Image (cartoon, coloured by chain):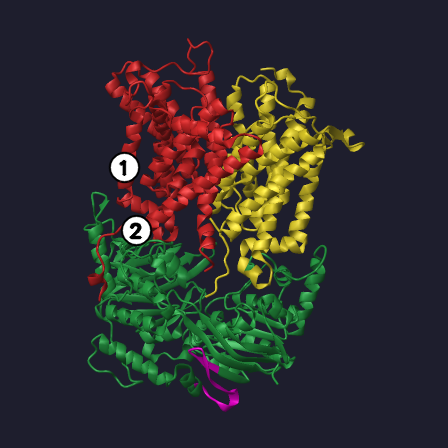
Chain colours: A red, B green, C yellow
Amino acid sequence: MTAREQVTLRRSIDWGALGRSAYQAALSVTLSLLIGALLLLISGQNPVLAFRSLWDGAFGSVNRFTETLVQATPLLLIAISVSLSFRCQIWNIGAEGQVILGGIASIWVALTFSELPPAILLPLTFIGGALAGGMWSLIAGLLKAYAQANEVITTSMLNYIAVYLLAFLVHGPMMDPAGFNFPQSPLIARSLELPRLVAGTRLNVAFLIALLLVGAALLYWRTTLGQRTEIVGASRRVARQIGFSVPATIALVSMLTGALAGIAGWGEMFGLHFRLIEEFARGMGSLGIVVALLGELHPLGMVVSAFLFGALVVGGNAMERNAGVPFALVDVIQGCVILLILARGYIFKFRRGAR
Amino acid sequence: MGIVEMTGITKRFPGATRAQSVLANDQVNLELHKGEIHGLLGENGAGKTTLMNILFGLYQPDAGQILVRDQLVTITSPAAAIHHGIGMVHQHFRLVPPLTVTENIILGLEGRGLLDLRAARQRVQQVAEEYGIQIDPGATVQDLSVGQQQRVEILSSLYRGAEILILDEPTAVLTPQEADSLVACLRTMAEQGKTIVFISHKLEEAMRLTDRVTVLRAGRVVFEALTRDTDKAQLAREMIGRDLIALRAEQRNRVLVLAGAQDAAPAGELAAPRATGKVMLEARAVHVNDDRGLPAVRGLSLALRSGEILGIAGVDGNGQRELAEAIVCLRPLQAGQLVIAEEDASHWGTHDFLQRSTGYIPDDRQNDGLILGFDLARNATLKLFRHRPFSAFGFLHDRAISQFTVEMMEDFDVRAPSPFVRASTLSGGNQQKLILARELSQTPRLIIASQPARGLDIGATAYVHQRLMEERDRGGAILLISTDLDEIMLLSDRILVMYNGQSMGELDAYAADAQTLGLMMAGTPLGGAEGAGGAA
Amino acid sequence: MNVELITFPFIVGLLAAAVRLAVPILFAALGETFTERAGILNLGLEGIMLMGALGGFVGAYATGSLWLGVALAMLCGIVMGLLMGFMSITAKVNQVVAGLGITILGSGLSTLLFRLFFGLRSTPPTITMFPVQPIPGLSQIPVLGEMVFSHNILVYLALILVPVAWVVLYRTRFGLALRAVGERPDAVDTRGLSVDRLRYISLIIGGALAGLGGAVLPLASLGIFWTQITAGRGFIAIAVVVFARWDPVRALWGALLFGSAMALQLSLQTLKMPIPSELLLMLPYIITIIVLVGVSRRAEFPAAYAVPYSRGEK
């Protein structure tokens, strides 16, 4: 029987592998939660109380639930951005800086061109945010492509620089003159605020845009550009032989990565805060990375993990307010999830018995 | 009583499936006498290296026993082997290039406190002199020639008191002169009472160097004798199971008949088909640098016509890889001109090369030829997916891609359950066939093939050779680069020998003999005096 | 701007501050030099330094002994280093992502434990730091005396560690094996040494020194602990290692370079330069990028860098 007769020409979904992946991911999260609980126990806190307030904080009411989605929105965007880079073997961890730049640029556009009608201005701010984030990431991309500079270091340096840049701007040039010396920018026009999806909550259109971009991501991997990204990520040598310019690909992917994170920044500004404030992107970078890894760098997987971590963040904040347990527990859970996900190949091989 | 006695050694390697497991050694008995040079012969995959790896502690036998100096031993690791006085020089040296000779030699030795490099250097010098080895203990290994690096490896074992030395295909990477030098060195060591095991598939050497020989075939000992009691023909017969010379002629005939030649000429009277096609590839005095910026190809010229195979012969490391990469436009020319299909290609990029009707089979199939993590369909369409019908407006057409792959798998005999399995699950032979499928599917007019049959078994090798000859007969121009002289002589119409980045001359394949080629590979240009080919 | 403040003593003070500020980075860089020479890229340095800072602070606070704080800091560093070792050597995962995981874990864990131990207070807990101990005689030398010989003991420890590290790396059997294992692990394996054991040891050294580097901040510079106290020094240390081309002595110069940048930034604030403080704070990070770009192109990384080793039976 020849291959032609034997094979079905459609790539069938390997449900077995998918199930295994999901199982391992769920196990990693559960274990991490248990480790967190253990830490709480050791330090004399009540883990049951803590997790109860975490759950309530995330899902306790319609309002809470929408907050979870609100929190998941930027995480999802950042995760897609990270997944793009990672699948190209570019270890770009500068999401936090790119989000900040996106926020700064979009607010700047809104404030500077405030005379333009919102129908034009709003898309302009969107483009501004995406461009700024893209450029910020491109710096690291170009340095990697043409100077072989380690992108982990350059992007994390750029993160710090971005944080200080934001601080400088809201304490200085972009400070609201009518703001009582508060480190914040003036508010954007009401007409620019993104419409709410559910009345009385903070859930806004940015969430839909994130879902839209998930769809775009799914399509991306079926394009020639997506193939090129994966080829360059998988083997630079083969990529060169097929005539792909590795530096150009790195630059392009870096730009797209930053643009997506910049859009997350735009979303935070125009859907949530409506003005530049400090620390609006705090911790989003590492959260985005965990979400991406937990979701196996696949757009649909990342939707699920973004939701999960959105819940953890919202719940974590509630947990700190109500049960007095520091939010840092969520950071610990993040770290554990990454390590467990990474090591799952080893752990599960070990359990199933030696080779 | 031998100094080493291996009895009943059996070793099986598990394969991906039960059927694919390999019995590398099957009840092998081997006896080594003190002070002898013993040749362990056999073709690729006969089990010679496995047997010696067992003796050196890298593998554990499934059955059998080993006696060293009449004592039963279990050699669990290289450290244990060294403890028993057994040392091994591998085909791929285990040296650390940025470190010095002395540092490499003392690496891993026991000792307390700080290193006394000066004392160590002196001791290295002493041992070297004892065995007539010329080496500078302070030199950095990456600055040494291949032959010298091999000396360091040998010295490493001697320094540790090895009495029994195993050498795995030691002359595979040496020029004939370096090989002579090595032979002299080994004889000195044997005279001093060392026992030497010499793994090889080269009969010439075995006859020249050894005192006794053992031939392995398919994991079993098929023949042992004193070297003076046997000859090349007999050894060849035992290695292959048949008469080697007649076999080669038969292979050639078979391939020619398959490719449509009218009559099979009797062995020894094969006439070269005259290539009359147009010149597809021309290199005019090209200079190419290697990764370190040093000249690797120095002023080499060649011309390749449609309907012929030009074989580039030479010992590994004389610029062949850089030449191949320059021709496929992966590496820039420092000087000279490259002409492909009558166009000036001197400043082309890979993209330009690919757009012409070309194919490239790189020598490292796992790293350069395929993306092992991708499935077969994606690998097969690596060069084509950007064009119709495999994509349109930037979107891929899955159906077209998989259909094409299935057809290619059938045409090129790639055996796999589906086009969606990962390339890493394929055997070496099937991987190479997949690469052939990709490169040859569009019937390119110019094909560059580098070590196309490296590491393949006999069946896959024959297939690859057959396809290349078919392409030649279809009018393709093929540049074959290989360090395997047999492959060169089997396939080529003309042969060009490279030494030290330069051409030592071209010959008709049918007029070439191993001795002439050997001299050329060692630096004697055709018709020229020794050494005129340029300083080493 | 108060130009009249730029006096000779001011500049000497600047240089002395440079040395002092370089110390955390120097410790971490020395440790990472060993780790990377063995072929492992440990991007978890930042997290390990944070755990070390916490360990040092808690140890000193709880026991009243600064040296016990140092010991606890190094212990925390070793534990984190071993965790990184498990991921890279035994589980053979992607070292970059594992390092990121360790950094995130260390960052979160240090914050969490600090908050759990001390709760939220209006005045943060403090400890008494290591005092400045000028070396009698040597500290009287003009310029050099203040620059090098008038510091706290951890600074002296760091400076002494540089030649010690050099000797260990280039003049001991262990150092030789370590250098070999990062280039050609198979060569080391053949000679009967354990590749894994060497790499684990390199992570123990790296972790201990990173932990110590982190502890310098609360124990000798600041006297308190706050979350993210290391502010990226772990990443800067990795850049220093590349800049130093994996050599301990050159790492000293690299660390001093960054120490100078930080000292410069502080002194510019004192001089009331018309540059906003936030922009000055960016200085070390910008310099890191520039330095990294300058050295990376020609850098000859250890050949087996960031590649997990498995002895292939073929």
**Would you say residue B137 sits in the magenta stretch?**
no
Assign a secondary structure to mark 1. helix
Q: Nearer the viewer, residue A354 or A149?
A: A354
Vertical position of residue B272 compared to residue C76: above or below = below
Which quarter of the rendering shows the N terminus of chain B?
bottom right
Asked whether the beta carbons under mark 2 and mark 1 sit within 8 Å of each other, the answer is no
Q: Nearer the viewer, mark 2 or mark 1?
A: 2
Vertical position of residue B339 compared to residue B38: above or below = above
Checking the image for residue B271, the label placed there is: none
Q: Give the range drawn in magenta.
A: B215-232
User: Residue B266's spot in the image, x, y percent?
Assistant: 27, 86
**Would you say residue B224 sits in the magenta stretch?**
yes
Residue C301 seen in the current view: no
- Residue bearing the label numbered 1: A216
Q: Which of B453 and A344 is in front in this view?
A: A344
Q: Of marks 2 and 1, which one's residue comes earlier in the chain?
A: 2
User: Residue A75's spot in the image, x, y percent?
Assistant: 38, 32
Q: In which quarter of the image is residue A30?
A: top left
Tell which subunit mark 2 falls on: A
Tell which subunit mark 1 falls on: A
Q: How crowded is mark 2: few (under 14 residues within 10 Å), some or many (20 or more)?
A: few
Checking the image for residue A14, the label placed there is: 2
Vertical position of residue B257 compared to residue C313: above or below = below
